[in-house]
Image: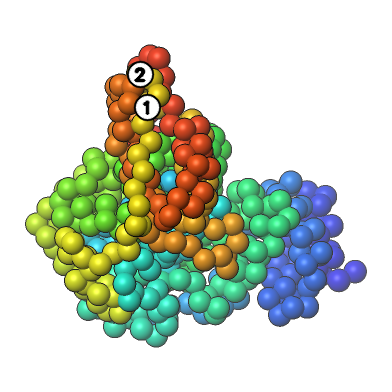
Amino acid sequence: MSLVLDAITTKRDGGTLSPEQVDAFLSGYVAGDVPDYQAAALLMAILLRGMERDELALWTRAMLASGTTLQLDGLSRPRVDKHSTGGIGDKASIPLAPAVAACGAAVPMISGRGLGHTGGTLDKLESIPGLSTDVAPERFRDQLERCGVVFAGQTADIVPADKQLYALRDVTGTVESIPLISSSILSKKLAEGIEGLVLDVKFGSGAFISDAERGSELARTMVDLAGACGLRAVALQTYMGRPLGRAVGHSLEIAESLDCLRGGGPDDLRQLVAALGGEMLTLGGLSADADAGAASVLAALDDGRALESFRAVVAEQGGDPASLDSGGSLPRAPELAVLEAESAGWLGFGDLRDIGRALAALGGGRERLGDRIDPAVGFVLQAVDGDRVEAGQPLVEIHHRGGAALDAASALLRRALQVRSAPHARVPLLRDRLA
């Protein structure tokens, strides 16, 4: 029996994979020697049977070893990063990274693209005219020394095992496996050569894992796995049963991020950036504790240092810093519609994924990684969760192009935005901290 087939039967029967089995499977799959049907069988066995702590660490380190890692030892700044499990309007990385860099850290942020109902940091950044997130690994060190931030995508030689397995998980019903999610995220973050990681694990209807307890399990697994791999990590569990901020859509979220970088913007976005940034600065040894770190991040937002840091990284990556100014050249949809409340009551949210689906209907989302997106379309909420609204009051601005799919998007928004007959308590943004 081959080691790969042996790995499948071992995991099928609830056993623990050996180092030899893990290496044979991952190295063989990356090399093209293990067929997809065998890989799918092992992934399904992992989904159903799970993984032990040491086994998962072994798997993650083997995924990391399938490619190259960034060589950032000796950098003058401490190296920290953040990862979010994603959601609707989740733009926190965009003001967060430059704010933390303005406080003395280096943030080598390798991010992803939007897929399904969630948006992607890379797509949002690339709505800035000229900006490229195609940054070669050899450029990271110099750029981090100069401005403290790199926004980049995963290259072909960074954890290729993850890139191939992710595509297979997407079509085999194995996306929701907590061990596979954890190893996917941590292998990429370990490849960045960072010293500390903050995880923003969402729960609520707009989150990848909506159930709060299952989200807590994912957060605990990732923090434990990071520790087993020698990386200090903290996880914050945050609410995604309502959009983060008011803007949903690529260039609209850049504009809202710029408001935050100027010391303004929605309160929840500012709160989340401060909380995540405080943890990052503490892990990097730049603050005594998370509260002191959060205060430093807020000061950087308020005094202009964070905005200057963002302008510097935009210029480094080929973008036009002038486009960030008020009245700049960020993409704008040519037409605007307003969705009004049909009755009086209190605004709440149903299935938040419908807002992501509405954005996709307008052309601002993708179902497959190769799909093109329109960075200008999107929504801006005119009322927030728990607000009292009257009949005829604007609930959301719809930024669209020529009315394309406007009716379908409006129907999805009406399903997501619910005017209720009685007030309700707002769920706090921050639920838990795990370290």
> The residue under label 1 is which amino acid type?
Ala
Left or right of residue 94, residue 84 in this image: right
Q: Residue shown at 73%/63% (left/top)?
A: 18
Q: Residue shown at 78%/48% (left/top)?
A: 14
Identify the secondary structure beneath mark 2.
Answer: strand
Tag in front: 1 or 2: 1
Look at mark 1 in the image and give the residue it sits on: 341
Does 169 appear above or below 294? Answer: below
Does 425 appear above or below 285? Answer: above
* Residue lying at the far left of the rendered structure: 303
* Residue lying at the far top of the rendered structure: 422
Mark number, residue 345: 2
Residue 245: image quadrant is top left
Residue 141: image quadrant is bottom left
Classed neighbour count for the residue bearing mark 2: other residues with Cα under 10 Å, few (<14), some (14–19), many (≥20) = some
Residue 201 visible somewhere in the drawing = no
How far from the left and from the top, in percent, is residue 311?
21, 70
How far from the left and from the top, in percent, is residue 46?
72, 53
How far from the left and from the top, in percent, is residue 27?
69, 76
Say how many tags the image has: 2
> The residue under label 2 is which amino acid type?
Gly
Q: Which residue is more in the foreground, 187 or 242? A: 242
Classed neighbour count for the residue bearing mark 1: other residues with Cα under 10 Å, few (<14), some (14–19), many (≥20) = many
Question: How far apart are the two marked residues, 1 and 2, measured between alpha carbons?
Answer: 9 Å
Q: Which residue is more in the foreground, 132 or 38? A: 132
**Marks 1 & 2, CB-CB < 8 Å contact:** yes
Left or right of residue 18, residue 381 in this image: left
